[in-house]
Amino acid sequence: MADPQRARKMADRIKEVVARRLDKGLRDPRLGFVTITDVRVTGDLQHASVFYTVYGSEQERADSAAALKAATGMLRSEVGKNITARLTPSLEFIADALPETSAHMEDLLVQAQQRDAQVRAASAGAQYAGDADPYKHDDDEGDDDDVEREPRA
């Protein structure tokens, strides 16, 4: 098993190489606006999972996934030329769920704001249920502290 720091450095290097190659462009017209978000390398440095997002519709995402799958061999060759490792790791492209997760989080934040507004509106004319000052003070009349109590048996 390789050093975790070495695996992290290799993952960063693979991310740079793949992103640079995609920036130059592939000859596949199906490839859309792809962003490499993360790369994770296994402990033995034999396999790399490349996470990506695609800007666009569901059809563009599917087309980009097919284009990346078709270009995996070429991208692996490019990675092999640009890293200093005895063996080139295999690449697996995984669509990152980042856009869907962020959209879900935004929906939750909107719901929370609506509920806060409802609570704020409901509490606008509200008053406390008890006295304005519910705490006991030493100068209160009718304190029971002065009354002597019988000792318990």
Image: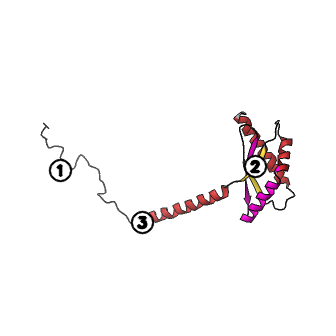
Residue 96 can be seen, yes or no: yes
Give residue 33's position: percent from left, percent from top. 78, 59
Asked if disc 1 and disc 3 are in contact, CB closer than 8 Å, the reply is no
| Left or right of residue 135: residue 54 | right
Type of amino acid at the residue the image marks with label 1: Gly
The picture places residue 23, in percent across and down from the top left corner, at: 82, 53
Q: Which mark is residue 33?
A: none
**Dot 1 corresponds to which residue?**
142
Report which quarter residue 129 is drawn in. Answer: bottom left
Q: Nearer the viewer, mark 1 or mark 3?
A: 3
For the residues labelled 2 and 1, the Cα–Cα distance comes to 80 Å
Query: Label 3 belongs to which residue?
Result: 122
Residue 57 appearing in the image: no
| Residue picked out by circle 2 | 92
Closer to the camera in the image, 16 or 134: 16
Magenta includes 29?
Answer: no
Q: Distance between the residues labelled 1 and 3?
A: 37 Å
Residue at 84% x, 62% y: name it.
29
Q: Where is residue 24 shown, x and y percent of the image?
A: 85, 53
Q: Distance between the residues labelled 2 and 3?
A: 53 Å
Q: Of label 2 and label 1, which has the lower sequence position?
A: 2
In the displayed structure, does residue 83 sit left or right of residue 49?
A: right
**Residue 9 vertical placement versus 70 (above, below):** above
Nearest to the observer: residue 88 or residue 13 = 88
Q: Are marks 2 and 1 in contact (CB under 8 Å)?
A: no
Query: Which quarter of the figure has residue 100?
Result: bottom right
Q: Which amino acid does label 2 sit on?
A: Glu
Residue 115 versus residue 95 in the image, above or below:
below
Residue type, mark 3 in image: Ala
* Region in magenta: 46-72
With 152 as the anchor, is 56 left or right in this view?
A: right
